[in-house]
Every structure is written in structure tokens, then in C-alpha cells.
Amino acid sequence: MNEKSSMRTATRLVANNTLEIADGISLPVPQAIQATTVLFDSPSRMLPIARDSLDLTSTGRHAGFYYGGVGTPTTQALAASLSALEGGESCALFPSGQAAIHAATAVLAQPGTALLVSDSVTYTTRWLFDQVLARQGVRVQYFHPLRLDVLARMISAPGVAAVFMESPGSMFFEVQDVRAISGLCRSHGVASILDNTWAGSVLFDGFATGEVDVVVLSLSKYHGAPCGVSGGAIITREQDHHMKFRNFGALIGATLTSDAASRIAAGLPNLPLRMQRMADGADHILATILGHFGTIDILRPCAALCSPDSLWQRDFSGANSLMTLRLDGVCLPSMQAAIERFRVVRHGYGWGGDVSLVNLVQPNLWRDFPFGGRDDAYLRLYVGMEDPLDIADDVLRVLSSVLQPRA
Ligand SMILES: *Cc1c(COP(=O)(O)O)cnc(C)c1O
């Protein structure tokens, strides 16, 4: 994307994360430049008000700014950093991951067409597709995240507009063959969209390994959660796609504020370091649990400690700090009572920040293709920035109240 793109991630994150304030003079942290009104020295420099005004903002002297909500130097700086990080060409910013997913799918899947969705998507994505897109006439069809043969049949049906992947999947972390799926999409003239949030812009390069058209991100997790900021992004390689997403956001007024963009940008250079620290913590907790209880089922696409997943090894440079525990033989009421006892790990939704979290979840209740039994309950654990020894103590203490240690 620019001359610095051959550098390694950590270097790129620092080098690109600047805001030019005058020709040749820049700041190392993109400060929030707030604006609603943008002033021009002559009316001839202003955009004409016409149906295609938004398209004109992408070209020539109208590039960039004409009205604060649509783009500021701060949001442009964050967009540039994110698209470089994800290996794309352009990035459109949104106030949440949900808004980004909505824009990507609403633009690519028109009413009357079909949107094929991996069954492993997070529940909020499913709510959006079922309760908004489906009601607007998009045929939303779920596919088993690992059944390429089934997807190949579904994609051959008439009217398929786009395929939506999330890999590793929410809750069970199924690793999809993003390269094969996006290749299948390309050969059928169908758009491919990947929710790459799990990887935190660090662990998986959706564009390099596949032929993915569009990467969507929730910035409310590893990127923004440490400073309490929500955001979303759509990264693309095609300018044509990019303009449609950006214009969709502008038309419905779904834009990211400069303040939010500045806070997210300020945290970017530390993102790989934080993720590494939390992944190390998760490794430690996982090893502690396995050492103590032996047979417990822990789901995390991590070759070091779980069963190696060749796709994960092929595509990912590491694991994040989420894991799901299946406690066989423990009934729901005792699990509900047990999780009350967590002290270091807290109860809450919205992972990605400093605080470790635990949730009792029953994902099979809402999935089309259950991973295990319909009613099975799982603990989803997010490892944050506390000392891993303290988190491990907390987890062991709680699990010991419902499980026997190994013989
Ligand atoms: C959180 C999340 C979303 C939704 O993002 P928001 O910013 O909370 O709207 C989408 N996809 C994945 C994988 C997520 O984890």
C-alpha cells in the first residue's frame, strides 16, 4: 500500500501511525481533530451538491474532507493504518463492528439475492442477518463452517450474491479454509466477506492467504476495548467496493468520531505486544487446567496445547486469548453456581480489554448445526492483562468446585 509495507508489523504500526499537520511535519499519535464544518478559501473548491457528490469526494481536489462527520484527518490516519495492517488498499470506518457488517452485507447482497453465512458467526451477526437483512428480502442461508462440499452446492444455486465467513468461529473456534472458500466464491462471481476480528489485525492476513474481497473488523475488541471505545472497519482492495461502503456509511450517517479514531490509533502500536502477553497468559492457564484435571475439553485453535489444526497452522501466526471449556458431566445449575465464585475473572460481555471475563454460554441453542448436544453448556473464558498466575488460581479454584482432579 505504501513504501513502508515491506516492514514487519510492529515497525509498520509505529511508522504509519502518524498525522501530518503541515507539509513534512507530523505527529506520532493521531490526535483528535474534531470538525463538523470544513471551511474552504473559495466556493469553487467546494463540492457541488448533486446526486453524485459523495463519489466526487474520492477524486481530485475534493479528495478527503468536505464535512466533518464523513472524514477528518484523524479518521483518515486510522483508516490508513488499519488498511496497511490488514494488507488491504482502503478502509472505511464505522461506529461499531455491527455497523460495518451491516454496510458490507447490505451493499453486496441486495434484496432478492442470497447471502450464505458460516454457522460459526457470532450471535450479534446472526441477529443482524435474521432480523434486518432477511426482513428486507435477502435470503440468509447458513452453512456448516467446515463443509466445503455443501457450500460448493449452495453457491451454485442462482442468485447467490455473497458468502460471509468468521474464522476462527465464535464460541467453538472452527478454523475455516478461507483460501478455498474465497477461491470458490471467485470462481462463481460471488463476493467473499471475512470477519477477521478474532485475529486482532495481527494474527491472520485475510488478503494474503486467500482471494477474500472484503475484511470486516469489530474495533471494539482488541483494538478499542482497552480504552473503552467501539468501532468497526471494512477493508478492501478494490476502490470500487471501497467507495460503495464509504458512501453507504455517509448516507446513513454511520461514521466514526475523531475522538474514537484517535483513541484506537493511540493503542495500535501496542496491539501486538498486548495480544502476545494475553496469549501467553492463556497458554499458561490452559496448561494449568490440563495439568490439574487431565481430560477436560478445551477449545482454542492453538497447536501448542490443543490438537493441532493444520489450517490454523497454515494461516495464523498465533492464537488470541479466548478459549471455551466443555465440562462434561457437570449440570447447568452447578455450573451456574460455580461461576459465581470467580474473583479475578469478571462477568461481562465485550472481550478485548484489560479485564478477564467468563461467560456461561449455550451456543448450540441458536446454531443451525450444533457442535455437540443441543443443551450442552460451555464456559467461555477471555484472558486479559491481569497476572496469569492470579487468573490461573481463580480458574482452578472455581473448577475444583465442580470437577475432580486427575488421578
Ligand atoms: C464483537 C464482534 C462483532 C460486533 O462488533 P461490535 O463492535 O460490538 O458491534 C462482530 N464480529 C465479531 C467476531 C465480534 O467479536
Image: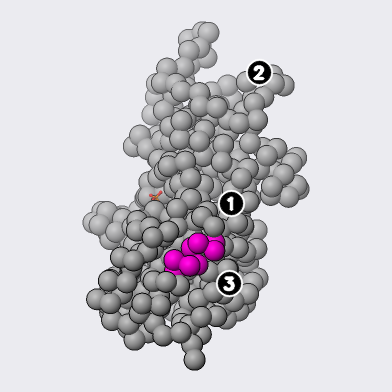
Marks 2 and 1: CB-CB under 8 Å?
no
Image side of residue 315 versus residue 264, left or right: right
Residue 17: x and y, percent? 63, 36
Q: Mark 2 points at which residue?
A: 22
Q: What are the residue bounds of the magenta stretch?
A: 388-395
Local SS, label 3: loop
Up/down of 333 relative to 136, above or below = below
258 or 72: nearer the viewer: 258
Three-letter residue code for mark 3: Cys
Q: Which of marks 2 and 1 is in front?
A: 1
The local crowd at label 2, few if under 14, some if 14 to 19, many if 20 or more residues have their Cα within 10 Å, is few
User: Most extreme residue toward the bottom, as rendered?
Assistant: 407
Q: Mark 1 points at which residue?
A: 274
- Measured as percent of width and height from the top left, residue 132 is found at 27, 54
Which amino acid lies under the numbered mark 1 shown in the image of this protein?
Arg
Counting residues from the N terminus, which is met first, the one under dot 2 or under dot 1? 2
Q: What residue type is labelled 2?
A: Ala
- Name which residue lies at 52% across and 14% down: 45
Per the model, the C-alpha gap separating discs 2 and 3 is 46 Å
Q: Quadrant of residue 51?
A: top left
The residue at 62%/28% (across/down) is 19
Where disc 1 sits, the SS reads helix
